[in-house]
Amino acid sequence: MSTSTDTPISEPKRWDLEPESEYRFELDPGTSLAIKLVEGQAEVFGFELAEAKVYLFGSECKAAVYTWKGCAIQVTGVPSTEYVSNETPMRIYANLHIALEQMRVRALRQVRGSPVPSQEANARSDPPRVLVVGPEHSGKTTICKILTNYAVRAGQGWTPFLVNVDPGEGGWAAPGTVSVAPVKGPIPTASSANPLGTAATNAPMSLASNTLLPLAYWYGHPQTKRNPLLMDRMTRNLGENMNDRFELDPEGRASGLIVDTPSSYASGPSANDHRHKLINACIDAFKINVIVVVGHEKLNVEMQRSYGANLMVVKIPKSGGVVELDSSYRDRVTNYQLHAYFYGQVIKPPAGITNGSLGGESLTDLVLSPSSTVINFNDIIIYRIGSDAMAPSDALPVGARRTVSEMQPVVVDPASPGSRLLNAVLALLSPQASDESERYDEEVLDLTLVGFLIITNIDITTKKMTVLAPNRGSFTGRTAVVGSFEWQEQ
Amino acid sequence: MSHVYPQSIYGQPSYGVPVPGFSAQRATPASYQQHYFQPPPPPQPQQQAAPPQPLFHSDPNSFRRDFTSRLSNLTINSRVHIQDLSMMAQDHPHFSSIVAQSLDHHIRQVPPWMKLPGFYLLDAISKNVFEPYASVFSRIVTSLFMDAYFQVDSSTRNKMEEMLLTWRTAGPEHSPLFGPETQDRLQTSVWGDQSFATKNQVLSELQFTLGQMERALQANPRDRTPEGHIHVLNQLRRLVERGVSQPELRQILEQLRTLARSALPPPVVRPPPPTPRPVAAPYYNQHPPFPPQAHAPPPRPYSHPPPLSFNSIPQAVDVAPPQAPVPALLPSNLESLMASLVKSGVLSVPGTSTPTAQGTSTPEVAPPLALSEREDPSAVKDMNTREYRNFILSEPIALTTSDITRARPRIVELLYERQTSQCKQCGIRFADTKLGKKRLEDHLDMHFRQNSKVDQGRGHSRSWFTSLENWIHDASINEKGKGPAHSLSLTSTKVDNAKREEELRAQFVVIPPGAEAQSVSCPICKETLQSEFLEDEEEWVWRNAVKKDDKIYHATCHAEATTSTSSIAARLRTEKQQGSRSATPEVYPMTGIQSTTLRSTPPPSLLRKSGSRSPPQLISPGSKVAGVKRKVDHHDSDPLEDGTGTPPFKKLALSSTPIPSS
Ligand SMILES: [Zn+2]
Ligand SMILES: [Zn+2]
């Protein structure tokens, strides 16, 4: 106060929150925030905070500290927006959670053959398989996260499967994927880079949700309308594999699944649009029995009409804390996600904070070292899927048909001037069938993703390129697919 | 809550477990006696390779050089090194300020994970040599301690908190080791304003006292007194965890401290203990000799001396009256503390019946065993599977928009009140049941292993995602937080198979009423299923069992049968039987549909019978049963043009399993 220092240390501010209220904040690029629970109980999107531990937030994180029973928190740093709200839909979300828990306990009862009381005789015993739909900025991802976190916090050993079919959303690794991960512990919220937890690294982590093992397919684009056929196929592939796993693990199946969808599934011209088809793909693939519509009456009516006869459709309000985001924000988040995938989370704590944790982990454990290697052009085979590799359709002569379908993998030659491979995000796929006779043209569409690569340099004269890989594991002889995401240095 | 750190979890606890009888065999070199506030260190055990004996220095510079260089080797918690340095300090009291400077410099410049051993040395010198060191250290200890405290990880922080609590009574006449002001400043910095008791602090101190009781019990299993104390302290802890008011917290804290002070042996005249006093023994040699080891033994950790000796608690001691406006207590009797707190209304016991309070009107005569019998069953909220199910199903919430909008959820009870044990490190909660405690222990064990891994490998990196086969079989290497290896191979899942098998064997099916006497055998291996009574379910169950299509299989047999049909090998076999695919149209016998595709794509996976795949599965030529799992094929015609958006093949497959509706 009386002295001035070089680095402005913002005084920690104390906020006393009444029961069922929340402290909301938004961060500007390059800033961070530290929050410490001083008293009472508090949670961030269903993730309970430990008392006295310092939690850091960064990468334009927008979140809220909610309390059921009241609490006091201490906040250090300067958010671009901060306020307390007493109006939250948390009670409704909690009721929804309890209704889903009812489905889980009945499902487990059936798996174990536990006796069914007479008043329960007619109750169904399907585990909850929930599709969350809603327009842009309705907080779908947050709701999926809260429902998942409450399930794992029930203390019943649930491992819900969190599915992400929004390729514009990074989920646990990077955007462009259709993926699923079993969730064994509560998912923290700390940065926009990892909204649904973090894929595993070889660093020791204290939270299970920071070591997720996703199963992912590489769609390659942020927009589902770019290649709905591919979305459809990958969604169904994912469902098939999940069913295989459930076959092997009936108890695991009882925990159910929660599907986060892109906003394109909720809006746009209805009639000949692809969205109904993609919703159908989800319903088939994941055997959806509950549709949760977030804050949109028209969509609710539409879902009731289309699916209300066969499955449950419920509407819940969106939270007032949800922020409208522009497209430049989306681009920055994509960039944060890709960087976090390779380099981990690097966040500078607010001045004066030395003991913070990010998503429950110590900062040093979150820093990753990718590896950069020079390889020959023919060390990996790179594909681009479908017409994207070809001329746009309006450039084709009238009446001419495409020679390449939307689903056909086309080999990309790094040496060709129009390869557009420099700084492109590549998806490294799992190995192709070792048996030649098992191979087929579209096999690359059905191979799961093992990681991402970035081509940071191409030398046509020596036929070599420099590749950024997440680790030192070898990938020569492997297949990769390029999409429309591009790497930007930060 | 604060952690319960069972000794068994932390292989090398900061507080050693004394071995009864061992300390009694040690001789005490009489010549050192007068220097010591506490009994002096016995000779070093021969089993340990001790550093060269310190020389006596008369020159401050050579002392500084020697001490600093020895100190620089104190990189881990090594008892030998701490002992060596402590002796050196003891022999050179006139250089105490050099010791303080060197130690201050050392602790400040080493990385956070290396700081704790330095503090253990400071602790050892202060407690065992005391003056002049305690007064010299008291000038530097506050900032040194707090600066380090904010840099170290949480497990180290817990150890530092524990150490700080021992300092409170480690001085002469059980005064604070570094004086009351220093102690107060440190406690305020760690736990906040000392006139404002936080729940965390009370739990910390409760846990600290509990830990000492447990050690006392381990040290002298014949003395059952600590057992009763542990029991009551645990109950007190539960009350605090459930939430008590600020004045209540304050009073509990004062009572605890009064109790801790009075529980100390009288400072001047120490009554001869009836048994060897392992707890009060100094930290040196609390451990038995090393067992023979093939490899170089790890250095012994320093175990700093607990200040309290509970097995010598006098039965009646005059104590200063407690300052809190609660009835005077017999401080050695924890149970009456609890009872008085409840009776005087300081603590309000949730729930209606409070037999704990009422039953303790004459607690002094109640043997510890009777305590557990008197324990209020409702006080321990058991969340076993069945109870949880009943609780959840009794909530009047149907999955409809109007119900979930209107109902008032009992969510707080579910998420918080029924799970009172919380991991301090990550916030995860556990039920206050036997099972919950076990889970918390496993959980803390996991953290411990994580923490001990932190500095081993530098340069972490993102792992490849797991393979499809491993994912489907949940071969997660990752369970305990270790990332999968950076290998793209599909093999090397042996360890995970063991874990998976363990999980399978834990699965069970409840035996239907009336079928208890029946002998049921597994359709695969034909062996009889084993039944047992499962306390958690309160039911008779078949273990290692899974129910499929109204048949009971061994979970392991079922998994094996299912797995083998979906394994890569099986897939290859299947595909071989199919013969090579040609570009000619294929007819799928089971559907009769002629494929119009001209692509060389595999047959679709539609023929897999969803939901009815029972082991053992026969793979007949012509049908692709479990083979092509990741291939959902399309016709040339756009499947999305189809009315339902479902590819025709797929739709056929789905038609046998209609969309579940509930
Ligand atoms: Zn924990
Ligand atoms: Zn069997």
Image: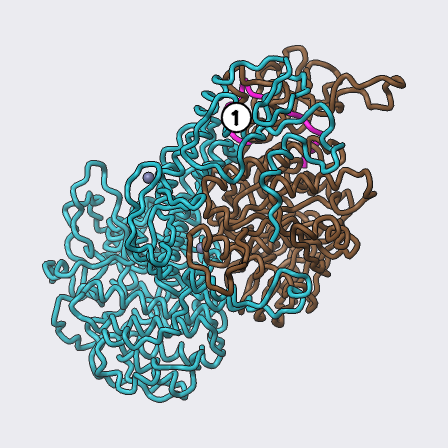
Chain colours: A brown, B cyan
Describe residue A281's horizontal placement relative to residue A255 as left or right. Answer: right
* Residue closer to the observer: B13 or B630: B630
Residue A473 point in image, percent of width and height: 50, 26
Residue A400 point in image, percent of width and height: 85, 17
Could one spot residue A20 in this view of the protein?
A: yes
Label 1, ligand 2: CB separation under 8 Å: no
The residue lying at 66 percent from left, 35 percent from top is A176
Residue A372 point in image, percent of width and height: 57, 26
Relative to B364, residue B88 above or below:
above
Q: Which chain carries label 1?
A: B
Residue sticking out furthest to the right: A398
* Mark 1 residue crowding within 10 angstroms, few (<14) / some (14–19) / many (20+): many
A482 drawn magenta: yes
Task: Point out the stretch of residues depicted in magenta.
Answer: A470-490
B513 drawn magenta: no
Secondary structure beneath label 1: loop
Q: Mark 1 — residue?
A: B624
Which quadrant would residue A331 be assigned to in this image? top right
Picture mark count: 1
